[in-house]
Image (tube, grey):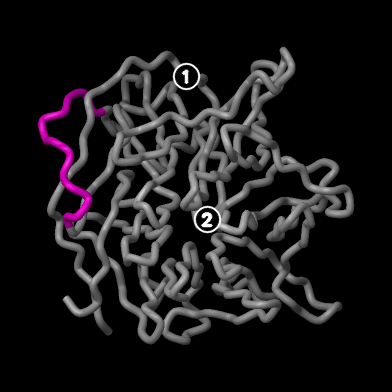
Amino acid sequence: MKIIMLLQLGLILFAVTSFGQGPKGPLLYRDQGRIRIIPPSEVHKIIPRGSARITSSSISRQPRSRRFQLIEYPGAAVTQINKINANGDLVGHAVVVTSFDDQGNWLTWDQVGFKLTAAGFEKIDFPTSQFGSDVHLYGTIPMGLDNSGRMVGAYGIIFGDQPPVVFYGFLFDQGQYTTLKLPVQFNAEFNRWTQATGVNTLGQIIGSFEDEHLAYHGFLLNSGQWTQLDFPWPPNVDPGYTNASDINDLGQIAGVYSDPNGQQHGFRLTNGVWEKVDFKGNSNTQTSISGINNLGQFVGTANEKKQNVISFFFDGASYHVLSVPGCAVTTVTSINDAGFAVGDCDQKGFIAKLNPSS
C-alpha cells in the first residue's frame, strides 16, 4: 500500500482580534460529514484540556504553492476546513475559546464560519435580520463553495436564551442569503437538522436532513426540484442513513450510507446509478467519502484493520493513505482538480498538494 506522507513546509498563524464572550452552550463540531451538537459537559472528550488560544503570530503565512500548510483561524482553538474550490479558496468553521475554568476546560466560546482567499480570512454569518426578536444565531458553518463564490452550509439558531440548537441549510449567491426549506413531502415538519454540503457550477445543491422519525437522508436540489437521496434497498429492509457529502460539476454525488447490519460505506451516484465504495474493496472498513473532484478522484476516511480512523485519496486507480506528520488524527474533507486537498489535523486545518508518486 502506498502511503502519501505530506511534508510539513509551512504554518499559517494570524494575529488575534478581539472577540466577545460566547454563550455557554453546545459546541458545533463537524464529524463524518455531519454537524454534531456537543453538550458543554462533553466538550472535554472532543478537545484536550488546556487547549490554548493563539495569542501571537511569529510565523508568516507561506505561499499556497508549498506542499503542505497548517491553517488556523485567528485566535481559534479549533479550525475545520470543509471545502476547497478550483480557485484554491477555502471555507470552514472555527471555535474561539473566550474563557476557561480552573481545570483548563472551556467555559465559553465563539463559533465562527469563514472563507479564506488570497486576500485573507472573511467571517461568514447568516444575517440575523431574517430572524424574529426571540431567535438568536448560534453559529454559521459554510460547507460547500463553487468557483463563482456561491456558498452553501448550515446555520444554527436558538429560541430565547437556551438550547437546543436547530439547524437549517443556507445558500449564499450573488450577495444574498437564502434558507433552504425542505418541502412538506419530506416528512420534515418537525425537522431540527438540515445541512447543505455541496454546490457545483450548475447550481445543483446537495446535503442531508433529519426527518420526523429521526432518520437521516440525503437530498439534491436542482432547478428548484427537490429529490430525496437514499441508497437503494428492498422495501422490507431498514435503509439506515444516507449522507450526501459533495457534488462535482458533472453532477456526480458522493457520500456515505449505512447498511442493515450497521456497516458504513461510501457511495458515488452517477446519472441515477448508485455505486458502493469501500476502502481497498473491504466492506468492513467503515468507509466514508467526503469530497470528489471533476476527474472522479475522491477523498474520505476509513477504519483499516480495526485501527484508528485513517484518511485516504483515490486517484482513479489506487487508494493511498493520507498522513500528516506529527498529527495523531488526519481527516481529509475535499479535493479540487489540481490535486489540492484540505481537511483537519489535531484541531487545525490543513491544505496539501497530493502527489502519489512521492
Q: Is residue 57 magenta?
A: yes
Magenta residues span 54-66
**Screen quadrant of the C terminus:** bottom left
**Screen quadrant of the N terminus:** bottom left
The secondary structure type at the circle numbered 1 is loop
In front of the other: 117 or 255: 117
- Whole-angstrom CA distance, mark 2 to mark 1, is 25 Å
Residue linked to disc 1: 22
Looking at marks 2 and 1 on the same chain, the residue that comes earlier in the sequence is marked by: 1
- Residue at 43% across / 29% down in the picture? 123
In front of the other: 63 or 22: 63
In front of the other: 247 or 186: 247
Residue 155 drawn above or below residue 211 = above
The secondary structure type at the circle numbered 2 is loop
Q: Is residue 342 magenta?
A: no
Judged left or right of residue 355, residue 121 is right
- Residue at 16% across / 44% down in the picture? 62
Residue linked to disc 2: 33
* Residue 291 x/y as whole percent: 47, 63
- Residue at 30% across / 44% down in the picture? 348
Say if mark 2 contacts mark 1, CB within 8 Å. no
* Residue 295 x/y as whole percent: 44, 75
Residue type at the position of mark 2: Gly
Judged left or right of residue 84, residue 353 is left
Judged left or right of residue 196, residue 85 is left
Residue type at the position of mark 1: Gly
The mark found on residue 352 in the picture is none
The kind of secondary structure the magenta stretch mainly shows is: loop
The quarter holding residue 204 reads bottom right
* Residue 287 x/y as whole percent: 49, 72
The crowd level at tag 2 (other Cα within 10 Å; few <14, some 14-19, many 20+) is many
In front of the other: 68 or 135: 68
